[in-house]
Image (cartoon, grey):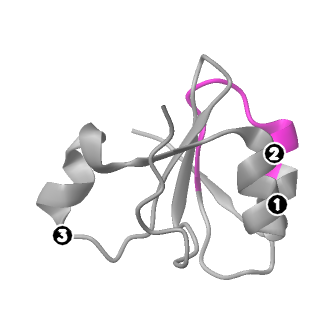
Amino acid sequence: MFRQTRPWHPPRWITAEADGTYTSVTGRESQEYMDDAATHEIWTRSSLAARFPWVHYFLTAAAANDVARFDDASGAYMLERD
């Protein structure tokens, strides 16, 4: 059920999904790759927080469909709007 093909690269964007999971991309991918939802990593809250602890604040505050952009490992993020 969960795909984690790039777990060694920290996420640049994380999306909170309505079903309680999170998807992420690193930003190292091509635009075509990033636009293909089938290539995004799918995480549970606990697995994402355990692997990348600085995303904790977003994970606890995020509403469904929120997208956070992380520029570094400080924990600071910006919500992205379409």
Q: Quadrant of the C terminus?
A: top left
Q: Are marks 3 and 1 in contact (CB under 8 Å)?
A: no
Magenta stretch in the rendered image: 58-68
Three-letter code, disc 2: Ser
Q: CA distance from mark 1 to mark 2?
A: 6 Å
- Helix, strand or loop at label 2? It is helix
Give the residue number, with chain letter if any, for mark 2.
Answer: 46
Which residue is at 51% across, 39% downward?
A: 2
Position of residue 66 relative to residue 10, above or below, is above
Give the residue number, with chain letter if any, for mark 3.
Answer: 30
51 relative to 43 in the view: left or right = right
Position of residue 46 relative to residue 12, above or below, is above
- Helix, strand or loop at label 1? It is helix
Three-letter code, disc 3: Ser
Q: Nearer the viewer, mark 3 or mark 1?
A: 1
Give the residue number, with chain letter if any, for mark 1.
Answer: 50
Which residue is at 52% across, 78% downward?
A: 9
Which residue is at 55% across, 66% downward?
A: 11
Q: Which residue is at the far left?
A: 32
Position of residue 67 relative to residue 49, above or below, is above
Q: Callout 3: few (<14), some (14-19), or many (20+) C-alpha neighbours within 10 Å? A: few
12 relative to 28 in the view: left or right = right
Magenta region includes residue 66: yes
Out of 9 and 57, give the one closest to the viewer.
9
Position of residue 4 relative to residue 46, above or below, is below
